[in-house]
Amino acid sequence: PLCVVGRVYVSNEGVNAQIAVPSNILPNFRAACASLPALEGVDLNLDLDIPNAEFNAFPPFRTLHVRPREQIVVDGLDEPLDLRDQTGIQLQPDEWHSALDNPDAVILDCRNTYESDVGRFDGAVPLNTTTFRDTWDKLADALEGKPKDTPVLTYCTGGIRCVKVGAYLEQRLGFANTYRLEGGIVNYTRHFRDIADSEGAPFDA
């Protein structure tokens, strides 16, 4: 009845969903999520609004698939990370924007190469990974010789990968000053697009 399509992965780590919801149904979808104790307070990281005609012509998904997974993001690590604690400090888009000006910070683009090649924040170091499993050696290389109190800023597309990256930086590599962009590029772009729209200004991602 909610006309939701897409894919949802469920594991003990949490839920990762890439779905499309009709805008007129979104309030009902929010209410449905809030009615489930397991999803209470769940973050709905909204991306672009797609006009109905465009969606019908080029649907990103055709059906809804819900699948169990061992991990919502396969990391290839032998021992699991603790995702409940020491995962880095989340920064809202405005806070992140300010943090980028810190000359002592190392900014890490934790997306795969094909994503980083599209564009990245000024000064960001791309990890140049093919899959998320490649991340750990690339992190060690990118931060080799850096003091453990170095500010490390990480970002990805939707923020999920950087939860694990933050945990690895703190729990395995011993960095104590780590930050991650809440909601990733998706949330950052939407935040500043909404500001531009409210001010009647053009938005250039």
Image (cartoon, rainbow, N blue to C red):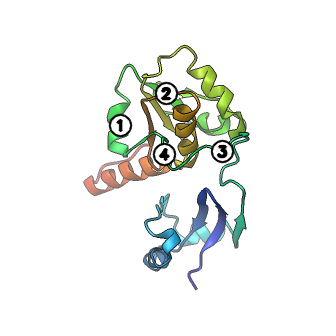
Of mark 2 and mark 3, the one earlier in the sequence is 3
Which type of secondary structure does the marked residue at label 3 adopt?
Answer: loop
Q: Amino acid at mark 3?
A: Pro
Residue placed under numbered mark 2 in the picture: 175
Residue placed under numbered mark 4 in the picture: 85
Asked which quadrant contains residue 109, the reply is: top right
Of mark 1 and mark 3, the one earlier in the sequence is 3
Number of other residues with Cα within 10 Å of mark 3, as a class: few under 14, some 14 to 19, many 20 or more: few
Which type of secondary structure does the marked residue at label 1 adopt?
Answer: helix
Number of other residues with Cα within 10 Å of mark 2, as a class: few under 14, some 14 to 19, many 20 or more: many
The image shows residue 108 at horizontal and vertical percentages of 52, 30
Of mark 3 and mark 4, the one earlier in the sequence is 3
Which type of secondary structure does the marked residue at label 2 adopt?
Answer: loop
Mark identifier at residue 37:
none
For the residues marked 4 and 2, what is the alpha-carbon distance in whole angstroms? 14 Å
Q: Residue at x 66, y 44 (%)?
A: 80
Q: Residue at x 73, y 41 (%)?
A: 76
Of mark 2 and mark 1, the one earlier in the sequence is 1
Q: Residue at x 35, y 55 (%)?
A: 194
Q: Residue at x 72, y 56 (%)?
A: 70
For the residues marked 2 and 3, what is the alpha-carbon distance in whole angstroms? 18 Å
Which image quarter holds the N terminus?
bottom right
Residue placed under numbered mark 1 in the picture: 97
Q: Amino acid at mark 2?
A: Phe
Of mark 1 and mark 4, the one earlier in the sequence is 4
Q: Is residue 200 left or right of residue 129?
A: left
Q: Amino acid at mark 4?
A: Asp
For the residues marked 1 and 4, what is the alpha-carbon distance in whole angstroms? 24 Å
